Amino acid sequence: MPDIWYWIGWQKKTNGLWVSCPEGTACEVDIAGATVSLFKPSAKMNNSGLPTRQFLDRMGAAMTDCLVVHDEMDLPLGQVKLKLGGGDAGHNGLKSLIASLGSHEIKRLRIGVRRPNNAKTAKDSVLQPFSNFDKTALEPGVDRAIDILLSEMAAPALCKS
């Protein structure tokens, strides 16, 4: 996996074993005493909705069981927010998920990737390699994202934007 912004949701390693499945790759991990399936669609981000829908269907899981981790250009680098619902804000991966899942009510863990004074378009920005500054600035945000995920698994709360 390349070390670029496009893959932000998959950057942190897990201690589970990733295996191929019809829709991509999946991994089961123990989080807060529960077995949780992590899923990486085989399709590129912009077309990730259909394989995600197919994975949820095959697993017998509802959309409400799904938490999507994604890059967020509207948040400063490393800032993390949990959100329920909303539009796609021009994010083609979210657009694909919303279309395939049939609802905007998707639980999202948004990780900020907007660099200070960045005038690049989202497309140009998220396909660039991480700089050393970016890696250093992003690491606490990824750690916070994991903490939020663990907290959400232990005691689901009403999502806040």
Image (cartoon, grey):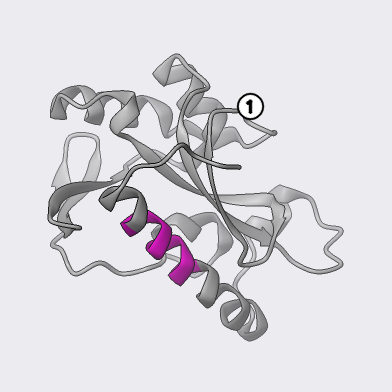
Q: Residue at x 21, y 22 (%)?
A: 57
Residue 124, image x, y percentages: 72, 55
Quadrant in the rendering for residue 89: top right
Q: Nearer the viewer, residue 17 or 109?
A: 109
* SS label for mark 1: loop
What residue span does the magenta drawing correspond to?
142-150
Give the quarter of the figure containing the N terminus: bottom left
Query: Is residue 97 found left or right of 21 in the rendered image?
Result: right
> Which of 106/26 is in front?
106
Question: In the drawing, does residue 17 fall left or right of residue 101?
Answer: left
Using the rendered image of the protein, determine whether residue 51 is visible from the camera's viewpoint: no
Image position of 21 with respect to 33: above or below: above
Q: Image quadrant for the C terminus?
A: top right
User: On screen, 127 above or below 123?
Assistant: below
Q: Along the horizontal axis of the image, is 111 left or right of 115?
A: left
Number of marks drawn: 1
Kind of residue at disc 1: Gly
Along the horizontal axis of the image, is 83 left or right of 115? left
Residue 14 seen in this snapshot: yes
Q: Residue 122 in the image: x percent, y percent? A: 72, 49
Q: Considering the whole magenta stretch, tell me its main secondary structure.
A: helix
What residue is drawn where x is 69% and y is 49%? 123
Q: Which residue is mark 1?
A: 87
Q: Is residue 145 magenta?
A: yes
Crowding at label 1, few (<14), some or many (≥20) Cα neighbours within 10 Å?
Answer: few
Observer-nearest of 46 and 37: 37
At a point 14% along the width and 30% down the height, the residue shown is 59
- Any magenta on residue 40? no
Q: Where residue 157 appears, x then y in whole percent?
A: 40, 41
On screen, residue 132 above or below 90 = below
Q: Position of residue 139 (x, y in %)?
A: 51, 76
Question: Which residue: 39% across, 63% down?
Answer: 146
